[in-house]
Amino acid sequence: MTGTPAITSHLRFSTIAAFLGCAAIISFVTLFQPCDTKAATPQAATAINSGDRAFWKMQYHKADSLYSIAATHEPRNAEIWWKLARLEVSLGESLRHDRTEERVAHYRKAVVHARRSIAIDSTSADGHAWLAAALGLAVEKSGTKEKLRSAGEIKQELDTALRLNPNDQTALSMLGSYYREAAGIGWFKRMMGGTFVGKMPEGDYEDAKEALQKAITLDPRVIRNYHELALVELELGHKKEAVVLMEAAMDQPILFYSDRRRLRQMRRLLEKLQDD
């Protein structure tokens, strides 16, 4: 693996880290776009729209109440359930890193909600994308082998989401992270010496770059995509490109709780790179 040794060794996870990056799976579909509530009852439509406004203000508990109200009026509305999955992921992301049990509980609830969304409407790209996100984060406390076993389903859900909507930002962002992690698991394969039963995930840094660059093009506001792409560039030894990406991220609005954490991480990385 190429890259600045001091940085890449600092970045390498001790385990696969859930394939989607341990704590911030959020790169997100059509920010602030009004939801399509044509099929919803008036009460459900009002609650969904109010829940969306609360969500984008990072008022997650208020959004939870509003989406739940919508679900009581329209329990067969797939949109409500993927938005509840997205919300549970965001609630988990808003907690401190040491509150692992609580965070994982939110991610597992997200899995349940996303599966329900898909059961109602299997053609929903959002449902498949958020199921992939939730699956990745739900195995946070699991061992490396279990994470690898989950990789197949995660990739299948991402592929389905992008087949249904090639411009799904959530899926593209997560796919970039998936490929970044897949590119760095050679150490695990060597360590296992062929004893691992299962298919190793495939992907390389160029695949990761392509997916993340497309996500940034679709919406340049999402901080997560700059951070993930900068990590890829560092793995490839492209220090200048990584610095440009991280500096660009500093100019973007904070849309999610996880953005604050990522900005702190990037500031520390920039300081380390300047010291090299």
Image: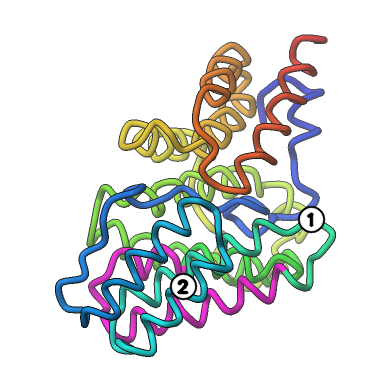
Answer with left or right where residue 225 lies relative to residue 191. Answer: left
Q: Nearer the viewer, residue 272 or 203?
A: 272
Residue matched to label 1: 97
Q: In which quarter of the view is residue 207 placed? A: top left
Above or below 129: residue 28: above
* In magenta stretch: residue 109: yes
Above or below 172: residue 218: above
Q: Residue at x 15, y 72 (%)?
A: 38
Task: Classify mark 1: residues with Cα within 10 Å, few (<14), some (14-19) or many (20+).
Answer: few
Give the SS element for disc 1.
loop
Q: Residue at x 78, y 23 (%)?
A: 5
Answer with left or right where residue 267 lies relative to residue 215. Answer: right
The magenta stretch is 103-131
**Residue 12: x and y, percent?**
75, 40
**Residue 127: x and y, percent?**
36, 70
Give the SS element for disc 2.
helix
Mark 2 belongs to which amino acid? Leu
